[in-house]
Image (spheres, rainbow, N blue to C red):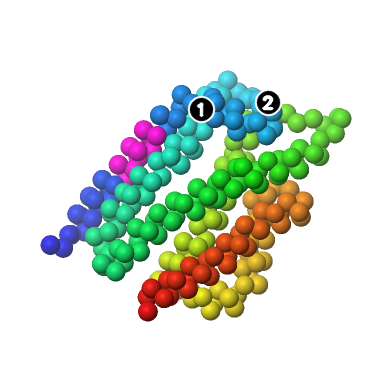
Amino acid sequence: MEESFWDHLEDLRKRLIYSLAFFLIGSGAVYPLSGRLILSLSKYVGNTYFFAPQEALFIRIKVSFMVGFAAMLPLIIHQLYIFISPALTRSERKYTAPLLFALLIFFYGGVAVALYIFLPYMLNVLLSFQMETMKPLISISKYIGFLLWVLGGFGIAFEMPVFFFLFTKLGILSPAILVKKWRVAFISILIFAALITPTLDMVTMFIASLPLFFLYFISIGASALARIGSS
């Protein structure tokens, strides 16, 4: 039996409520550990400081939200799948679930690469500009905002193969187009790397670009796989 518009709207409301509940439960579970998480995240810069009475509390809540969302992302993605699956054909369901799983894996992979490989190097470069008369006094709010920008940027950028696979399935892209436009893609990657690396150091920007260049070639393979699966 085909559902009405209001049935779809009610189902969407239910999925959003479940997703919000998962997010809040995850954030609440993380909050007792937020102090240790902040200590671990701050190891690259040493001591950090807050400049308003409420700032320390707000930062602990913000970190809890960040980590809670990342931890509950599989359950939130599952709610998305439950919502869209009734509208999919049998053939579309075959690749939708693996596609959503790949979305999670690539996101976590991007965050891990940024956190454990790229971020320590970039912070070392940025802090190397200090002088005898210019010492770092790092605001915890600005530092956490900086981390969110870099980690989120890498997490989203690593979704490239997933998006290209989907766009190929939708007929928007093809492997031939991706190969033909590789110069445009490389320039776009360099611009994106410049946006998520707040330093004028070209070496740092190039290092940030390397995994994205590699992912572009993986994305061409993902596009070709989507084309083969559609034929």
Q: Secondary structure at mark 2?
A: loop
Magenta stretch, residue numbers? 16-26
* Residue 149 appears in the figure: no
Image quarter (top left, top right, bottom left or bottom right) of the N terminus: bottom left
Above or below: residue 145 compared with residue 6? above
The magenta stretch spans residue 17: yes
Q: Which residue is label 1 attached to?
A: 34
N-terminal of the two: label 1 or label 2?
Answer: 1
* Residue 71 sits in quarter: top left
Q: Position of residue 145 (x, y in %)?
A: 59, 39
Residue 166 in the figure: left or right of residue 183: left
Q: Secondary structure at mark 1?
A: helix
Q: Which residue is label 2 attached to?
A: 47
Mark 2 residue crowding within 10 angstroms, few (<14) / some (14–19) / many (20+) = few
Residue visible at 53% across and 50% down? Answer: 109
Above or below: residue 216 compared with residue 108? below
The magenta stretch spans residue 73: no
Q: Main secondary structure of the magenta part?
A: helix
Above or below: residue 111 compared with residue 35? below
* Residue 177 appears in the figure: yes
Residue 129 in the figure: left or right of residue 95: right
Amino acid found under the numbered disc labelled 1: Ser
